[in-house]
Image (cartoon, rainbow, N blue to C red):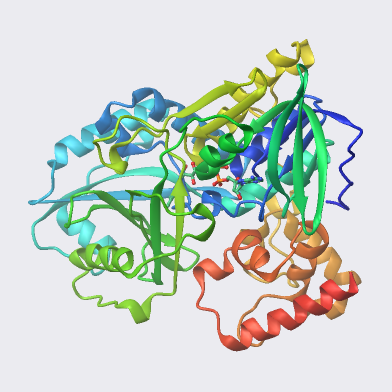
Amino acid sequence: MLTPQTPTEDTLYDLAIIGGGITGAAVARDAALRGLKTILFEKTDFGAGASTKTSKLAHGGLRYLEYGEIGLVRESLRERNRLLNLCSPWVKPLPFLFPVYDSSRRPLWQIATGIRLYQCMAGESSKKWQRRLSADAVGDRVKGLCADGLRGAAGYTDAQMQDGRLVIENIRSSLSHGAQAYNYSDVVSVRRAATQWHTLSIKQNSAQFDVSARCVVNATGAWSNDVLNRIGVERKLVAPSKGVHVVLPDIGLDAALVLEAPQDRRIFFVLPWEQRTLIGTTDTFSDDDPGSLTVNKDDVRYLLEAFQRYFLERSFDEDDVVATFAGLRPLISSKPGHAASAASRTHRIVVDQDRVISVAGGKFTTYRAMAEAVVDLVARRLGETAALATCQTDVLPLWAADESIKNGAPSDAMPDHWPDFYGPRATEMATLMQARPDLAEPISPDFPYLKAELYYGIQNERVHCLEDWLERRTPIALSRKLTPRFIKDASVTFETMRGAS
Ligand SMILES: Cc1cc2nc3c(=O)[nH]c(=O)nc-3n(C[C@H](O)[C@H](O)[C@H](O)COP(=O)(O)OP(=O)(O)OC[C@H]3O[C@@H](n4cnc5c(N)ncnc54)[C@H](O)[C@@H]3O)c2cc1C
C-alpha cells in the first residue's frame, strides 16, 4: 500500500470520507471503483472503533426475526452469502446449535420453525437444513454442556469473519483503485465553503491542513453525533449501545452456541474463535466517550455467570480470562423506553447542507450494501453518469484470487496461523521472507509470530504503533494473554523496524 500520497490542499476531491471503520472503508472502496476521486480520514487506526470489537459473525441475525425485522434479516443473509463468496478465507461458514431447556423462553419446535424460516430466507435448499438434535446427541457433541432440563437443540449454519482484516482489505482495495486513505488523521471541522463544496480541516500529528470535497460522508459510528456537531448540525443520529466480550481458554467447541442469559433471558453466544472460546455480548445504552471505552468488572461477571449456568463443571473466574474487549454499536436513535438489545439494527442515511451524507446503524454484515446505497446517493448529488451509477462490489472479490493459497497447502516456511490470519497476503509474506531470511525469526520465544509479519504490517498496512498490528491487522491481542516478555520483545522489534524504515 503503499506509500501514502500527500493530501493536496489545491485538489477538489469528489468525496471525502470521515471515519475508517468498516462503513467508511467500504464507501471508499465502492467510490474508488466507480472512479470517484476519493479521500478518507480516520482519527485513530483503521477499524479501531466498533469494527474490530464485534462477535466476529457475518450473520442474518436469527433473533431479529423475533422483532419482525424481516427486511433486515433478509438483507443481512443476502450480504452474508456475498461475503462468503467474495471474502473467503476471512469469512467462513460456522455451524450453530441453539440448545433449548425446560426453562427456555420458547419451546424447541418454535425455535426450529424460526430456523427453517431463516434458512428459507437465506435461499438454502432443504437438503442442507440441519435436523433437530436430541438432548443426548447435543450432550455428545458439546462436552460439558449442562444436561439438566435440556430438551434438545436446533442446528443451522451462519458465518464467522475476521473483522479487522475485512476493514484493512477494503482500505487496501480502495487504495489500489486510486483512493487516498489516512489513519491518525482527525477531522476537526467541516465547513461549507461554497454551494458546490465543503472544506475539511484535518489534524495529523502536529500538522493541520485543509481538504476540499464536493461531497462529504460522515461514517463515524458512535461518534456520528459529535461529528455532526462539528459540522454545525444539531442532530442525534445515534444512540450507542455498549457491547463487551470475554475470551476464555478453549473449551473444545466445534459449533457456536446460542444461549439465553439466565439473568435477563437475553440471547448471548459462546463461540469457538482463534483456538479460544469467545463469549458475548452485553448490550446496554451508553453515554461513554467512544474513544476511552473500558470493560468493567460487572460486564465480565455477567458474561461469566451466564456461561457458568450452562457449563457447571467448567469453573472459570476472572483470573482465567484471556482477554476482554468492548465496543459501541452505532444504533439509530429511536423512541426511548426499550432495551438496547431490542433496538433496530437497520441503518439510516441522512443528508445535511445538501452534500454532507451521514450513514449509521446497520451491522458489520451489511457494510457492503450500506456503502452501495451511500455511493449511489453521492453519485446522484454529483450528477450521475452510467459509470458512477454502476456498483461493482456485489460481484468483485475483495482481493485478487491467489491460487497458491486457494489450491495448495501452505509452504513449509509458512507458519500454521498465516493462511487464517492473512489469507492470500501470506504468500506475499513468504516471498518477503525468502528475500529477507532475517525476518524468519520469531519476534519472541513466547509465541510463533515472526518478524516478517510485523515488518509487512509496517511496510504495507499503515501500522503506526504496536497496538495497530496486535489488535487490528491480526487478532493476537484480543485472543491471547500476552506475556511481559513478548510485549517487551515486540516493542523492541517494532522500534527497530520503524527506525530503519
Ligand atoms: C459488541 C459488538 C458486537 C457486534 N457484533 C457484530 C457481529 O457479530 N456481526 C455484525 O454484523 N455486526 C456486529 N456489530 C456491529 C458492527 O460492529 C457495527 O455495525 C460496525 O462495526 C460499525 O462500523 P462503522 O464503520 O460504522 O463504525 P466504527 O467501526 O465505530 O468506525 C467509526 C470510525 O470513525 C472514526 N472517527 C470518529 N470521529 C472521527 C473524526 N472526527 N475524524 C476521523 N475519524 C473519526 C473512529 O475513530 C472510528 O474508527 C457489533 C458491534 C458491537 C459493538
Q: Does the rendering let one see residue 400?
A: no
Query: Which image quarter holds the C terminus?
Result: bottom right
Instruction: Give percent across and percent down for residue 340.
Output: 31, 42
Q: Is residue 115 above or below residue 143?
A: above
Q: Is residue 301 above or below residue 163?
A: below
The residue lying at 63 percent from left, 84 percent from top is 486
Q: Is residue 242 above or below residue 195?
A: below
Q: Is residue 265 left or right of residue 375?
A: left
The residue lying at 52 percent from left, 66 percent from top is 478
Instruction: Give percent across and percent down for residue 425.
Output: 74, 56
Instruction: Give percent across and percent down for residue 90.
Output: 59, 50
Q: Does the rendering let one see residue 253?
A: yes
Q: Is residue 476 left or right of residue 205?
A: left
Q: Is residue 251 above or below residue 136?
A: below
Instruction: Give percent across and percent down for residue 43.
Output: 67, 51
Image-quadrant location for residue 140: bottom left
Label count reads: 0
Q: Nearer the viewer, residue 427 or 55?
A: 55
Q: Nearer the viewer, residue 173 or 11?
A: 11
The residue lying at 36 percent from left, 79 percent from top is 320
